[in-house]
Image (tube, rainbow, N blue to C red):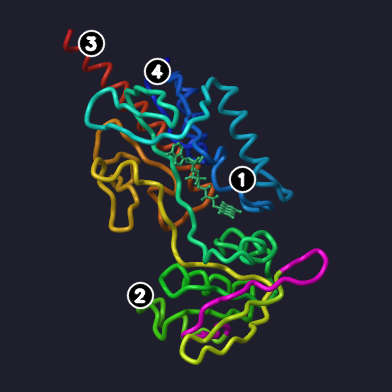
Amino acid sequence: MTNSISTRLVVLGSGPAGYTAAIYAARAGLNPIVIQGIQPGGQLTTTTDVENYPGFRDVIQGPWLMEEMQAQAEHVGTKIVWDHITSVDLSRRPFRLTGDGGAQYFADSLVIATGAQAKWLNLPSEEHMKGRGASACATCDGFFYRGKKVAVIGGGNTAVEEALYMTNHSHEVTLIHRRDSLRAEKILQDRLFANPNINVIWDSEVVEFVGGGDPDALIGLDIRNKRTGEVGRVEVEGAFVAIGHSPATELFAGQLDLDGEGYIKVENGTTRTSIPGVFACGDVMDKIYRQAVTAAGTGCMAALDAEKYLAAQEYEAIAAE
Ligand SMILES: Cc1cc2nc3c(=O)[nH]c(=O)nc-3n(C[C@H](O)[C@H](O)[C@H](O)COP(=O)(O)OP(=O)(O)OC[C@H]3O[C@@H](n4cnc5c(N)ncnc54)[C@H](O)[C@@H]3O)c2cc1C
């Protein structure tokens, strides 16, 4: 028999945004259900050291932080379900979500916290060097490379911003771009070219993340010049891949308003989407900050917005009786 669950609030996603929304919603008496998805705990479970989440003087581990958030959400009354949602119907009320194994979830309101995934170059050596010098987030990991030579890979706004950000920590930042011009906005390019601590290598693609030492850590990048075919090595201890992110919004295409890059659009200063009763928080609606603490912050906002929405619905139902 296929499972069917009805609830006032489903929180879709179990990263910092989803768990924070659940904590606030549970404490507001909404009995939320969190559907975890295939990455319980979200992106932070793919990293080790976290040094910028407030409240911890010492370095903490990403997976541990997410276990604590889950435990806190459960402690205040959240039901956690391990399932991956494969389709949603937001055209009817209650909203209907269908899980991988056919389970049906009916919800009066929905908080979407499905996050985003950083795009990588997909080289086997890059995979091996994740956490050993290869990163997709300078704001998160840049501090660990202070005083070291680093590279940023990419040519858009994010890459230029990450290169500029890294000059707070390093005097030798190399931007590696596969074309002969940048896609980034002109003002960012102007700042980049004016910065004496940034060197740009044009027309080049990374072909290998090179490790060495014990324990194994990044010592360089092998890059190929696309015009000449020549392969050379750039010696760096940190490499930040900044070629964009993919928000997890395929489920909502054609149902919710998304921006040109696929992020869920919300009303300014709120988490309200284009459908009343559907709220979005965390990296799925934020392409600028992309931090655990900002995801948690908007998760809190989504729960408060959902609580207000449900209270108004109840009031209207009583008034109509
Ligand atoms: C390697 C790395 C290191 C980082 N380090 C830091 C750091 O030090 N400090 C910091 O503040 N930030 C860091 N970040 C960024 C931080 O992890 C993200 O900003 C944050 O996790 C975003 O939270 P979120 O809840 O919006 O989404 P995510 O963490 O991306 O979680 C998304 C959730 O949605 C679920 N989901 C997706 N699709 C479905 C579906 N169809 N059905 C059900 N569930 C679904 C997933 O299973 C997952 O649980 C790092 C990120 C990475 C990748």
Labels 2 and 3: the sequence-earlier one:
2
First along the sequence among labels 4 and 2: 4
Q: Which residues are magenta?
A: 197-217
Q: Nearer the viewer, mark 2 or mark 1?
A: 1
Cα separation between marks 2 and 1: 33 Å
- The answer to which of marks 1 and 4 sits earlier in the sequence is 4
Q: Residue at x 63, y 81 (%)?
A: 172
- Say which residue label 4 marks: 4
Mark 2 residue type: Glu
Residue 316, position in %: x, y?
A: 21, 17
Check disc 2 and report the residue beneath it.
185
Q: Residue furthest front?
A: 1
Which one is in front in this view, the residue at disc 3 or the one at disc 1?
A: 1
Q: Which element is circle 2 on?
A: loop
Q: Where in the figure is residue 313, as x and y percent of width and height?
A: 26, 21
Q: Earlier in the sequence, mark 2 or mark 1?
A: 1
Q: Residue furthest bottom?
A: 228
What is the CA distance from the residue labelled 4 to the residue labelled 2?
49 Å
Of badges 4 and 3, nearer the viewer stands 4
Which residue is painted at 50% across and 83% down in the image? 204
* Residue ID for mark 1: 45
In this rendering, would 184 be left or right of 321? right
Compute the Cα span from label 2 to label 3.
Answer: 53 Å
What residue is pinned by disc 3? 318
10 Å crowding of disc 2: few (<14), some (14-19), many (20+): few
- Amino acid type at circle 3 is Ile
The reply to whether dot 1 and dot 4 touch (C-beta < 8 Å) is no
Gap in angstroms between the C-alphas marked 3 and 1: 44 Å
